Image (cartoon, rainbow, N blue to C red):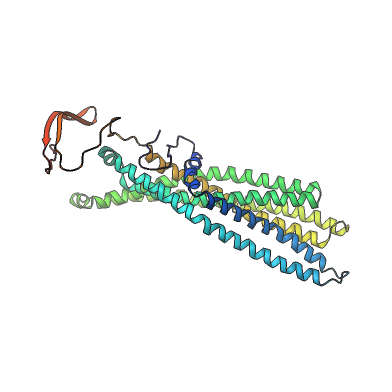
Amino acid sequence: MATRGHSSAPIERLKGNEWRALRILLPYLLEYKWRVAAALACLIAAKLANVAVPLIMKEVVDGLDPRTAIVAVPVALLAIYGILRFSTTLFAELRDVVFVRVTQRAIRRVALGVFRHLHSLSLRFHLERQTGGMTRDIERGTRGISTLLSYLLFSIIPVILEFALVAAVLIHKFDWRFAAITFGAVAVYIGFTVLVTEWRMEIRRRANELDSRANTRAIDSLLNYETVKYFGNEEFEARRYDENLQGYEAAAVKNEASLGLLNIGQSFIIAIAVTALMLLVAEGVAAQSFTLGDLVLVNGLLIQLYIPLNFLGMVYREIKQALLDMDRMFRLLGEHREVEDRPGAPELPSGPATVEFRRADFFYEPERQILHGVSFTIPAGHRVAVVGHS
């Protein structure tokens, strides 16, 4: 159980389940319920307008059939087409503007909670921890909050919503084969993406560890510049720093190679599905069971559906990475505070006061006792420092 400190929202330590970060962030999101609701409403409106665009374009193409002489219908539909195109962008931008306050407030509250908790920990914690790596973990964790909220709410949910709308249109206007191919392709696409991305996450995790280690090495070495110069250890410190950089270089190269494999596989799955669906529509047009507008409709729906899916691997990877980074930050909040007030401890009186210690014992480690039954008094307005042999 993590220490809450001064944060007004519950923060618990993550124990092997990175997705619990979503539950940890939920109280911060609910602080602005109306903003979240408005952002989701804008999201739904944008997707409805986006899916309606190919439907209108189908009617425009069919209305331009030379066998029809009603010119006013295509003109009106083209006007609606333009309005829908504009509405897609308008609602998407409104969504971002409305939700940015929620994201920034969550980052602020979490960062403040971590900062206060670190100041409440004992000196031993700060002496044992490497400041460079810890500050990098906090930086990544706060950045991960923005990444998580942005991609989860405005990439994953929109894709799911748009997929449901496209599937409904295909089932309503065409036969079962269109929906089956679409569902099957998306299922294979998602399965392939998840498997490869999970493998890539192990590479990213290793790269992050090496990056933190290199950053820690550099900061600690520079903080102890005088000692390094005194013993002439510049080359030794440089070699140790380069060892970590070399490991990070290898992990980064492997990461880019795996990204290429992921993109090739995703493109292959999408190409097969689009080709199969377009062949079905072309056969229907040749048999006069479908119109040219239907060909435009299917092509437009698939493009709008598969373009976001092209980024699914990146989105999934970034979400997992954000959860991992947040996990490392939240683990700092799980650090136990060694020095805490007893239950029912009275408040310190305001104004001048005398502090008295009676038979005080103190240690950081049980095997290394520092104070043994020490008694002393600190008069009001005085300062006393306890100094060891070192």
Q: Eyeballing the image, is 293 above or below 112?
A: below
The quadrant of the picture occupied by the N terminus is: top left
Find residue 256 and report its horizontal and vertical position in percent. 51, 52
| Count of marks overlaid on the render | 0
Residue shown at the point (71%, 61%) measured from the top left: 53
Q: Determine which quarter of the picture holds residue 51.
A: bottom right
In the rendered view, tell whether residue 361 sits above or below residue 77.
above
Does residue 189 appear in the picture of this structure?
yes
Q: Residue 284: horizontal and vertical position, in percent?
A: 85, 56
Q: Is residue 339 above or below residue 288?
A: above
Looking at the image, which is closer to me, 187 or 372?
372
| Depth check, front residue: 43 or 193 | 43
Q: Quadrant of residue 381?
A: top left
Depth check: give the residue in front, 231 or 378: 378
Residue projecting furthest to the front? 350
Question: What residue is at 81 percent from the left and 62 percent from the top?
Answer: 292
Name the spot of residue 342 as percent of width and height, x first: 28, 30
Q: Which image quarter is the C terminus in? A: top left
Q: Which residue is drawn at 50% across and 43% down?
A: 26
Left or right of residue 28: residue 92:
right
